[in-house]
Every structure is written in structure tokens, then in C-alpha cells.
Image: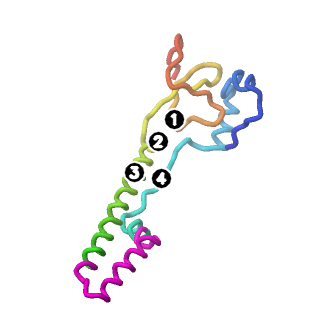
Amino acid sequence: VRCPKKEPLSHYTKSQGMATRGALSKAKRAHGRNVLSVPVPKFLDLYQQQLMSPLCVFQLFCASLWLFDAYWKYTCFSIFMILVMEGSTVFGRIKNLNTLRNIGGTGSAQRVWAYRFQRWAQIDVTDVVPGDIVTVDMPEGETETS
């Protein structure tokens, strides 16, 4: 969604949000629900991807060169540590993806105040569309209308 930047400030301060039900349904059809869906891949898929990264391939190649010398114990330990470190990186990526998924609103029942049809109403965050005027706190003197 492109955000208009060239309008004068008065255009934004006089905005009425979603003024009609037709405008709201049009916006919902055009933009859909306000949901962030983050797929979390399986551990083995991410681990394979991590092992194919250029840095890891270079580290494994350099460690395997030590096999041509008489340092096989050092090589085994180095390869083991590289595999463990890449595994911990994958666990961190999965944890971050799960955190992002939870922030995205899937399964959350968060509600915000939106100015629609010339009144403040509390709506679900997944129902917010471009053009809504939302506030974090309920305006003073207003009562819940939904």
C-alpha cells in the first residue's frame, strides 16, 4: 500500500477514517485481513541450508585439510564444533521465527480503538484496514460501542 506523502497536513487532520460501510468493505476486499503469517521451516531443512552457506563450507574444507597432516584428532574436534555451532544457529533462527510469528497476530485477541462511521469502536487488530484512524488508548469521554 502506497502512503500518500504530497498531501497538505490539513488533509490528514480532517480525515474521518472509514466513513461508510461501502468504503470499509471495499478496503477489506482490496487488502484482506491484517495478519502476518510467518512459516517456520523444519529443523533439518534449515540445518541443511546453514551447512551449505559459504562460510560453513569454507570452514569444513579448511578443517578437512588438516586430515592430510597428522592432526586427525584436531580435525574431528573442529568438524564436531562447526556442526554444533551451526546447529545452535539454526535453533536461534527457529526461536526468532516463532517470536515473529507470535507478534504477527496469528491467534492473538488484541483489540484497538478505531474511528469508524463517526464514532470510536473497539475492533480486533486483524480487522484494521488502510484508512482507519486508530488510537492506543480509549479517548476521554468516549464509551465502548462494540
In this rendering, the label closer to the viewer, 1 or 3? 3
Q: Which residues are magenta?
A: 50-75
Tell me the CA gap for discs 4 and 3: 8 Å
Q: Name the quadrant containing residue 56.
A: bottom left
Decide: few, some or many residues near mark 3? Use Cα within 10 Å; few <14, some 14-19, many ≥20. Answer: some
Q: Secondary structure at mark 2?
A: loop
- Looking at the picture, which amino acid does disc 1 mark? Val
Sequence-wise first label, 2 or 4? 4
Read off the residue under disc 3: 98
Sequence-wise first label, 2 or 3? 3
Tell me the CA gap for discs 1 and 3: 19 Å
Read off the residue under disc 1: 125
Q: Name the quadrant containing residue 20.
A: top right
- Decide if residue 75 is on the left or right side of residue 50: left
Read off the residue under disc 2: 105
Tag 2 and tag 1, C-beta contact below 8 Å: yes
Image location (x, y in percent) of residue 7: 77, 31
- Looking at the picture, which amino acid does disc 3 mark? Asn
